Image (tube, grey):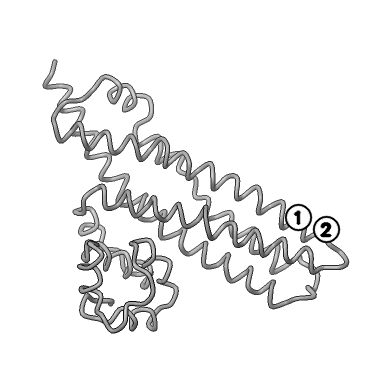
């Protein structure tokens, strides 16, 4: 387990794959010998939430559902938005660039590499649509729901949105886009011709595995924590509406 008394540098040595997770909290490299608690205090980061997220990504068997549901909704939403930003602004463009580099380095039998690129571009479009739906529709709805339940005043617009597009509907259509990465990886593993640059091919595959793991943990946080919390809020909003009658 990663704890607040550990040196942040030791956390990186323990599990370097946590670097992008740490960055999402606004914490960059160059922290010297400071421990996790000290850095979180300096950066105004909620240390309990920070440690839970790190340990979820570090240990696939660790997922403290009850504790996670106690955290403020805004903490969860802000983290999820930062994760979306990482996918769309860095990780997906990087993989696309590597695939284009692979095409340029291949002199013959490019058909399957073009197939890989087309499959990836379709996946990119689907992932982008999925993320934009969350950022532009679902998350603003949740924030409005939190606000109006707190002041115990449910607006007609929120009532209409709750009836037309409750979180239950989002849960049903919440595409597990991360599953499509399995097919994408298989194209590389099974069907690409022997590459001129096998190191580049391996690196693309490595990035896809990393993205898949990140997406799985991200989806688990949404499906198990976010949706349950929103269901409780919707239940509270409906109780308030009953009281108005």
Residue occupying the point 62% across, 69% down:
205
User: Where is mark 1, residue-wise?
Assistant: 115
Q: In which quarter of the image is residue 92?
A: bottom right
Vertically, is 59 above or below 93?
below
Mark 1 burial class by Cα count in 10 Å: few <14, some 14-19, many 20+? some
Q: Which residue lies furthest to the right in this view?
A: 108
The N terminus lies in which quarter of the figure?
bottom left
Vertically, is 191 above or below 8?
above
Q: Is 16 or 231 nearer to us in this picture?
A: 16
Q: In which quarter of the image is residue 187?
A: bottom right
Left or right, 51 with respect to 188, comes to left
Residue occupying the point 38% across, 79% down:
12
Residue occupying the point 29% across, 26% down:
158
Q: Which residue lies furthest to the left in this view?
A: 243
Secondary structure beneath dot 1 equals helix
User: Where is mark 2, residue-wise?
Assistant: 111
Q: Is 23 or 174 nearer to us in this picture?
A: 23
Q: Find the distance from the CA under tag 2 to the CA under tag 1.
A: 6 Å
Vertically, is 118 above or below 182?
above
Question: Where is residue 125 shown, x and y percent of the image?
Answer: 60, 45
Question: Where is residue 54 shown, x and y percent of the image?
Answer: 33, 68
Q: Do the residues labelled 2 and 1 touch (CB within 8 Å)?
A: yes
């Amino acid at each position: 387990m990663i704890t607040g008394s550990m040196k942040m540098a030791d956390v990186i040595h323990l599990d370097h794959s946590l670097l992008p997770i740490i960055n999402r909290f606004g914490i960059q490299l160059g922290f010297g010998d400071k421990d996790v608690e000290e850095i979180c205090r300096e950066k105004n980061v909620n240390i309990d939430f920070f440690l839970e997220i790190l340990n979820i990504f570090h240990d696939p068997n660790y997922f403290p559902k009850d504790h996670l549901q106690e955290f403020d909704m805004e903490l969860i939403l802000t983290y999820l938005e930062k994760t979306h930003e990482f996918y769309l602004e860095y990780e997906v463009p990087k993989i696309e660039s590597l695939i284009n580099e692979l095409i340029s380095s291949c002199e013959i039998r490019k058909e399957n590499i073009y197939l890989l690129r087309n499959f990836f571009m379709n996946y990119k479009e689907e992932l982008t649509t999925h993320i934009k739906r969350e950022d532009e529709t679902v998350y603003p709805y949740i924030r409005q729901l939190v606000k109006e339940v707190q002041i115990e005043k449910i607006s007609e617009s929120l009532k209409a949105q709750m009836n037309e597009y409750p979180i239950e509907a989002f849960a049903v259509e919440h595409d597990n886009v991360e599953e499509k990465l399995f097919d994408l990886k298989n194209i590389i593993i099974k069907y690409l011709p022997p590459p001129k640059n096998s190191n580049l091919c391996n690196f693309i595959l490595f990035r896809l595995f990393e993205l898949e793991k990140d997406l799985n943990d991200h989806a688990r946080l949404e499906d198990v924590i976010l949706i349950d919390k929103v269901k409780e809020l919707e239940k509270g909003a409906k109780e308030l509406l009953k009281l108005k009658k």
